[in-house]
Image: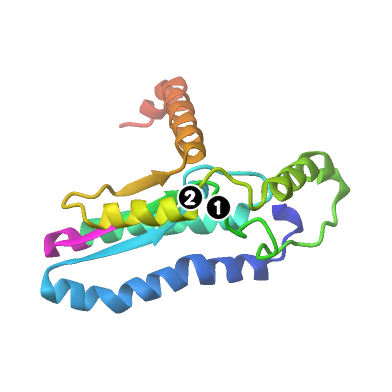
């Protein structure tokens, strides 16, 4: 949970998911720009489009990379360089298994919210719907495209959860429309 997690864990998460991805992209962008073609695929996550309790730093880092990818796409488009943010859902990887760094739980008030989430994650680890080989094939199809999308959701859970968030967001925007527009001079 955010309140329990040291800020150093956030820095580590952003170092890998944001600064690492941007450093790799920046290493390739000069040559892509000069030859007027290339493709950057930044792996964000459905966690870059939706949020889930207990992984605030992960989601925050993926949201950041999502935004950077959108800017990079608009900056590089005049040079024939494609940029797509790949937003996978749950795939049969070790993401929720032994590779996940877990903060020591210290605030009992969060147990009722988080314990079932952690148990569910551990129960499906390695049994997720997403097939990593099919993801790889989808990426190959993506990079062969002449008109790739700014973001590509992969997996039925990503499609379902992100679509539901977009619907909720549109409803919230409409519900607060009057106040939103009241600030114009």
Taking the magenta stretch, the answer to whether it contains residue 27 is no
Residue 85 makes an appearance in the image? no
- Residue 40 is left or right of residue 53, and the answer is left
Helix, strand or loop for disc 1: helix
Q: Which residues are magenta?
A: 76-83
Residue on which the image places disc 2: 48
- Residue 118 is left or right of residue 139, and the answer is right
Residue on which the image places disc 1: 59
In the displayed structure, would residue 155 be above or below residue 80? above
Could you tell me which residue is drawn at 44 percent across and 55 percent down? 133
Could you tell me which residue is drawn at 47 percent across and 44 percent down? 49
Expressed as whole percent of the image width and height from the top left, the position of residue 152 reads 35, 47
Nearest the camera: 83 or 125?
Answer: 125
Image quadrant where one finds the C terminus: top left
Expressed as whole percent of the image width and height from the top left, the position of residue 79 reads 13, 65
Nearest the camera: 180 or 44?
Answer: 44
């Amino acid at each position: 949970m955010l309140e329990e997690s040291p800020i150093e864990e956030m820095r580590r998460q952003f170092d890998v998911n944001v600064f690492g991805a941007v450093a790799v992209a920046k290493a390739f962008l000069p040559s892509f720009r000069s030859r007027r073609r290339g493709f950057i695929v930044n792996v964000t996550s459905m966690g870059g489009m939706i949020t889930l309790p207990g992984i605030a730093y992960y989601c925050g880092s993926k949201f950041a990379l999502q935004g950077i990818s959108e800017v990079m796409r608009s900056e590089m488009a005049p040079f024939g360089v494609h940029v797509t943010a790949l937003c996978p859902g749950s795939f049969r990887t070790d993401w929720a298994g032994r590779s996940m760094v877990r903060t020591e739980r210290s605030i009992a008030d969060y147990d009722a919210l988080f314990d079932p989430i952690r148990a569910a994650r551990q129960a499906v680890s390695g049994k997720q719907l997403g097939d990593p080989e099919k993801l790889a094939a989808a990426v190959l199809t993506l990079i062969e495209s002449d008109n790739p999308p700014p973001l590509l959701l992969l997996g039925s859970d990503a499609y379902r959860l992100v679509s539901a968030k977009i619907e909720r967001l549109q409803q919230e925007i409409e519900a607060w429309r009057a106040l939103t527009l009241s600030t114009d001079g």
